[in-house]
Structure formats: structure tokens, C-alpha cells
Image (tube, grey):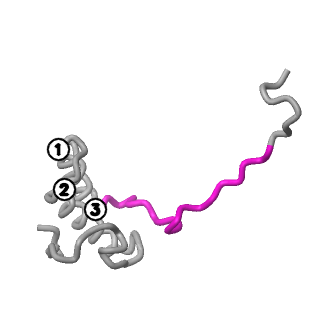
Amino acid sequence: MSANPGNALKALSPTPPERGSFPLDHDGECTKQMQEYLRCIKLVKGENAPNCRLLAKEYLNCRMNHQLMDRDEWKNLGLPDDAKVQPNGK
């Protein structure tokens, strides 16, 4: 017996991510920035802290600089334009 009598099973069709797929960081070019961001998030227990947003910006900037994601405006990524990120991640 089926749980939904009379209803035919519909094939699930996956939908792509909103911004498309992106390459994984297999060479670990942005691992340092990612780990700093994750440490910050853990420290503030998941709160939306300004210092963690700066670290997120550094991580995304690294990904964009290494062609691991398309370059986009910070406002489209949910981050403010006012905080400057150093190109070397410091």
C-alpha cells in the first residue's frame, strides 16, 4: 500500500543554484580566509557580526581574484561597499 493512494509519483527535477555553479577551491588558494571566517562565525555563535562580514568579504574577494567565482558588486552579495579589503587578505 502506498502512503498517497491515487497519486502518481512525480519525477523530481533538480533546479540549478540561483547564481550557477562555481569551481571548488581544490588548490586551497582561499582556505586561510575561509578558516578565519568560520572561526569568527563560531566565536560569535552565528550572529551577523561586522568583523565576520569583513572576513566574509576577504574570502569572497579571494575567490573572485582566483576566478573561483564571477566578480560581482558587494551589494549583490549582501555586503557593504564601505569596508575596504586589502588585496593580500590582511
Disc 1 crowd, CA 10 A, few/some/many (<14, 14-19, 20+) = few
Image mark for residue 89: none
User: In the rendered structure, which amino acid carries the disc numbered 3?
Assistant: Cys
| Marks 1 & 2, CB-CB < 8 Å contact | yes
- The residue tagged with tag 1: helix, strand or loop? loop
Which marked residue is nearer to the observer: mark 2 or mark 3? 2
Residue visible at 22% across and 59% down in the picture? 33
Quarter of the image for residue 73 reads bottom left
Mark found first going from the N terminus, 2 or 3: 3
Range of residues picked out in magenta = 10-28
Q: For the C terminus, give its image quadrant.
A: bottom left
User: In the rendered structure, which amino acid carries the disc numbered 2?
Assistant: Cys
Quickly name the residue at label 3: 30
Residue 8, x across and y down, in percent: 85, 39
Quickly name the residue at label 1: 44
Tell me: residue 57, above or below residue 6: below
